[in-house]
Amino acid sequence: MHNSAMKKGIIGVLGGMGPDATAAFFSMLVRLDVAASDQDHLHIIVDSDPSIPDRTKHLLQGGPDPLPAMLTSARRLLAAGADIAGIPCITAHAFLPGLRRNCTLPFLSAFEETIRALDAFSPPIRSLGILATLGTRRAGLFEKAMPDRTILWPSEEDHRSLVMEAIYGTRGIKAGNLGEEPHRLLVQAAQALIGEGAEAIVAGCTEVPLVLSQRDFDIPFIDPMYFLARALIETAGKGVSE
């Protein structure tokens, strides 16, 4: 049990990518943080800057580089007193090496924390079905982070018409729609991956858990943000609610 008088680390959240996912991640941090009172909760600093250029557009189309704006946000967090930080955006992890090289604020990785969690599953999960942006797919983030696992992606058609439509479409999650349409599209894409042998479905984009949950599947539904949140809380010196 942690004494509320003990010095605890301050968590920084480099957010805005997108705002709903950032808000959900903050709520997750609060929910997982073991606290007997308001004052016993961790100090969390959120810098949610939605003007950061779109990560997928940069990776796919050569759009504006988001790294300079991400560095500005990271330095704001550092100046505000953050001791450690996380990014509630999977695609933005393509730019994590640049952040780590150019900013002294320690950033935890959702990929590194998810790998630790997957290694603890029994029986082991070796085949992962990924629901993520085309930018994450093009960057090869999952393949680079998990070379010893089978990474299954939707077909090119499903990725565009189901996954990207659910995330970026006019009735998609980034347009503020957290209802039936994006849910239907993502479940359809996930079921196809399960049919191809996926032993778990991974929310490879932080918008995905806004409409999907474990209740939608008979196999494990893996949210990397959950494991990142747990690691941030533990690194900050607190217990994690189960």
Image (cartoon, grey):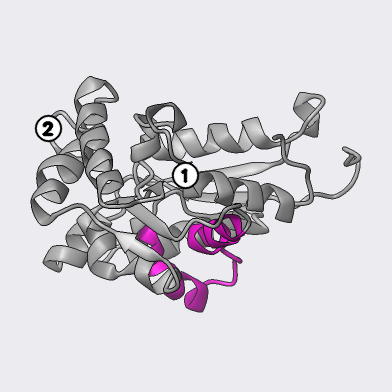
Q: Amino acid at mark 1?
A: Asp
Q: Residue at x 19, y 25 (%)?
A: 181
Q: Is 112 one of the magenta-colored residues?
A: yes
Q: Position of residue 150 (x, y in %)?
A: 36, 65
For marks 1 and 2 on the same chain, the one whose residue lies earlier in the sequence:
2
Dot 1: element:
loop
In the rendered image, the vertical position of residue 56 relative to residue 96, given as above or below: above
Say which quadrant the C terminus sits in: top right
Q: Are marks 1 and 2 in contact (CB under 8 Å)?
A: no
Q: Is residue 76 visible?
A: yes
**Would residue 63 be seen by someone viewing this image from the given angle?**
no
Callout 1: 10 Å neighbours few (<14), some, many (20+)? many
Q: Residue at x 53, y 56 (%)?
A: 114
90 relative to 4, above or below: below
Check the image and report above or below for 122 versus 31.
below
Q: For the point 38% across and 28% down, which residue is it?
A: 216
- Which quarter of the rendering shows the N terminus? top right
- Would residue 208 be found to the left or right of residue 71 on screen? left
Tell me residue 55's x, y (percent). Answer: 27, 58
Which residue is disc 2 drawn over? 170
Q: Main secondary structure of the magenta part?
A: helix
Which residue is located at x 19 percent, y 33 percent? 185
Foreground residue, 123 or 48?
123
What is the count of numbered marks?
2
Q: Secondary structure at mark 2?
A: loop
Q: What's drawn in magenta, residue-wise?
A: 92-119
Q: Which mark is residue 223?
A: 1
- Name of the residue lying farthest toward the bottom: 101
Q: Position of residue 29 (x, y in %)?
A: 61, 38
Residue 85 is marked as none
Distance (Cα) linking label 1 and label 2: 25 Å
